[in-house]
Image (tube, coloured by chain):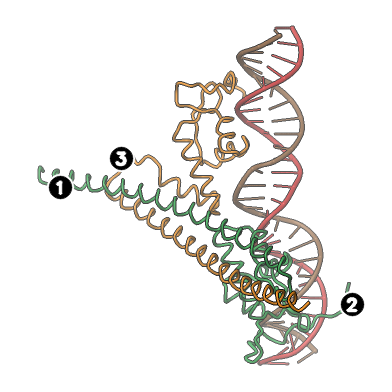
Chain colours: A orange, B green, C brown, D red
Amino acid sequence: MNATRRQPVPAAAPSPDDGLYGITELAREYGISLRTIRFYEDKGLLAPRRINGGRAYTRRDRVRLGLILRGKAVGMSLAEIEHILSLYGEHGEGHAQQLDYLIGRIDTAMAELDERRRHIETMVAELGEVRGELRRERAARQRAEKKGVRAS
Amino acid sequence: MNATRRQPVPAAAPSPDDGLYGITELAREYGISLRTIRFYEDKGLLAPRRINGGRAYTRRDRVRLGLILRGKAVGMSLAEIEHILSLYGEHGEGHAQQLDYLIGRIDTAMAELDERRRHIETMVAELGEVRGELRRERAARQRAEKKGVRAS
DNA sequence: CAACTTGTTGACGTTAACGTAAGCACTCGG
DNA sequence: CCGAGTGCTTACGTTAACGTCAACAAGTTG
């Protein structure tokens, strides 16, 4: 498997003109490792162009990476994220059926995310109740302390 | 390590009186495996009483398990969940300082959950946009098809 | 009493999501 | 020309969160 030789991009040159980014730029921009970005590629979540053996990322790729990281932030697995990402894909040509199917899948995804959101709201509410109890208790302590002070 | 012999609870008897539950009951109720429940115990997330060697769960334990599963549903790691669970613990006696500390931690937890919720809302909104595009495209196709039909 | 059920522990296997290390390629600055 | 910097691939290691399996114990039932 050593037919073609790799010709790494000369440097991490930000190449101000064409809208392409190097892997290091993306890594720094999003605060993740090179390994992670390559890993996402292995998983099929990213598919950067190859220029002289090096990876070249477009703005679209950057957006996709952003989606991936946001997905992770809300606790989605890479598989789920892949699922979602496919909904953003170029739906260049597609019949009405395909469109209906896609829209259906998006509805499903939105519903699932919404359920997740509701779960979170429930947890926030419950934590709020606990906090309320603690506050009342704290207030009681303070009154007690004041009494103590006045009594001393 | 065979000092004490286990004396498994006679059956999965729902023991209608005392408010205690067996591991199988909990597993079925929440749709998870026995192994998972024991695993959570190993992790310190649950600490059921032992009755004759068998695990006996109280209502409190059931609530905790519910919190654990909800945490998982929103994408929290068991470590994070453990963190949250500790906020529900019996704060039987504690000075004002302790209470302030606890309240602060709850505030932090709530803020983090809220951020997660916002991320989700962003994703839902973005998906909504994609869906909007697809709908417009579908409408265009339908108009085109009508034309085609009329022309045929 | 034998078989079955429910439960316990311990050890090993698995999947996801990376990290780490090794070794080679290429290019630029001095 | 030499070393530093950047990148690529391959391969093995790691952590979390369980699953699977085996062996054992104690009661329940035919």
Amino acid type, residue under disc 2 in the picture: Ala
Label 2: how many Cα within 10 Å (few below 14, some 14–19, many 20+)? few
For residue B3, the mark is: 2
Residue at 35% over, 41% down: A91
Tell which of B90 and B14 is nearer to you: B90
Query: In what quadrant of the picture does the N terminus of chain B appear?
Result: bottom right
Kindly report the distance in space between the C-alpha atoms of the residues bearing marks 3 and 2: 72 Å
Please give the residue where the numbered disc 1 appears in the rendered image.
B146
Amino acid type, residue under disc 1 in the picture: Lys
Residue at 51% over, 49% down: A71
Tell which of B33 and B26 is nearer to you: B26
**Residue B63 appears in view:** yes
Kindly report the distance in space between the C-alpha atoms of the residues bearing marks 1 and 2: 83 Å
**Residue A1 appears in view:** no
Measuring from the top left, give residue A19's x and y in whole percent: 45, 26
| Pointer 1 and pointer 2 on the same chain | yes
Query: In what quadrant of the picture does the C terminus of chain B appear?
Result: top left
Measuring from the top left, give residue C27's x and y in whole percent: 60, 14
Measuring from the top left, give residue A40's x and y in whole percent: 56, 40
Q: Secondary structure at mark 1?
A: helix
Q: Which mark sits nearer the N-terminus, 1 or 2?
A: 2
Please give the residue where the numbered disc 3 appears in the rendered image.
A93
